[in-house]
Amino acid sequence: MVSGADVLFKYLLAVLLLGVSACSSNSYIANTSTDALDSLSPVGSRQVSREQQLVLASHYHIEVGYAADGLRSEDITDLNRLARDALARHLRRYFAHVEVATTPQTLQQALRTAASHSAQLLLFPRIENWPNIEPIRLRECQDEEGNVMTSLGQCEEKDEAQSDELVVVVGIYDVLSGKHLDSVHARSRRGVAAYLYEDSEQELEVLNQLMVQRLAPNARRY
């Protein structure tokens, strides 16, 4: 059980560390190896990595798949659908021919659907981890005797481990052969900011923007 004193201490520490990080870093993307607030860093970080260095020609016909068996969060029933929509939005900024799968599918089903749409490439996004830290706020709780009390933070301990990490992977496949051509891995850790506010969907948009900028020949590089 997390006590109110522990949560209050973490909240005050979060505010202090955010103030320090604002003075020492000009960017939210700043990386740090410092461990604070359990396993959290005081500032957030984003990372995009590639298995290959495939660049997609702007004339390619692209299918964005909808991976089955997606994770769910407290508010979102299928996170892979969210990943599909975010990726398609950013691809359409650079590519004229982008189709979107409408139903959850396995990889083989997605390849067949892409072929029926005359697509050359299948991009198959999946959410592999979603932040589950609830921001600290004043909440009404009941003690063991049923008395209503105001508490800062959680009223009761969560069964699952808390994580501030968002991980999305996009597999890239040749539709004709079914061959895996490349994968893009993007991850974000929000650090102690995760205890102050929740913006995972906005963070997913940023990660997709960064991934597509690595794939599109006419995108601005970072």
Image (tube, rainbow, N blue to C red):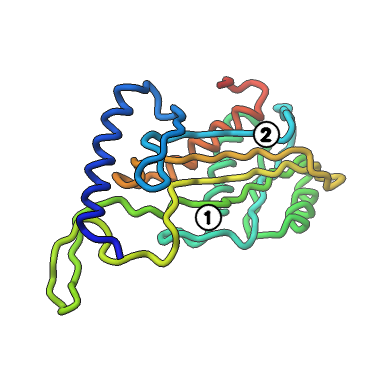
Which is nearer the N-term, disc 2 or disc 1? 2
- Against 129, is 69 above or below? below
Examine the image and state in which quarter residue 92 appears.
top right
Label 2 crowd (10 A; few <14 / some 14-19 / many >=20):
some
Residue marked by disc 1: 79
- In the figure, is residue 153 to the left or right of 35? left
In the rendered view of the protein, which quadrant contains the C terminus?
top right
Q: State how many labels appear.
A: 2
Residue type, label 2: Arg
Give SS at disc 1.
Answer: helix
- In the figure, is residue 57 to the left or right of 38? right
**Frontmost residue, 6 versus 26:** 6
In the rendered view of the protein, which quadrant contains the N terminus?
bottom left
Q: Position of residue 59 (x, y in %)?
A: 73, 29
**Frontmost residue, 128 versus 33:** 33
Mark number for residue 71? none
| Pointer 2 with pointer 1, Cβ within 8 A | no
- In the figure, is residue 107 to the left or right of 79? right
Label 1 crowd (10 A; few <14 / some 14-19 / many >=20):
many
Q: Residue at x 59, y 41 (%)?
A: 88
**Frontmost residue, 31 versus 39:** 39
Give SS at disc 2.
Answer: strand
Q: Residue furthest bottom?
A: 145
Q: Nearer the viewer, mark 2 or mark 1?
A: 2
Residue type, label 1: Leu
Q: Residue at x 38, y 48 (%)?
A: 38
Residue marked by disc 2: 50
Q: Position of residue 23 (x, y in %)?
A: 29, 22
Q: Residue at x 38, y 44 (%)?
A: 199
Using the numbered discs, state the Cα–Cα distance from disc 2 to disc 1 in whole angstroms. Answer: 22 Å
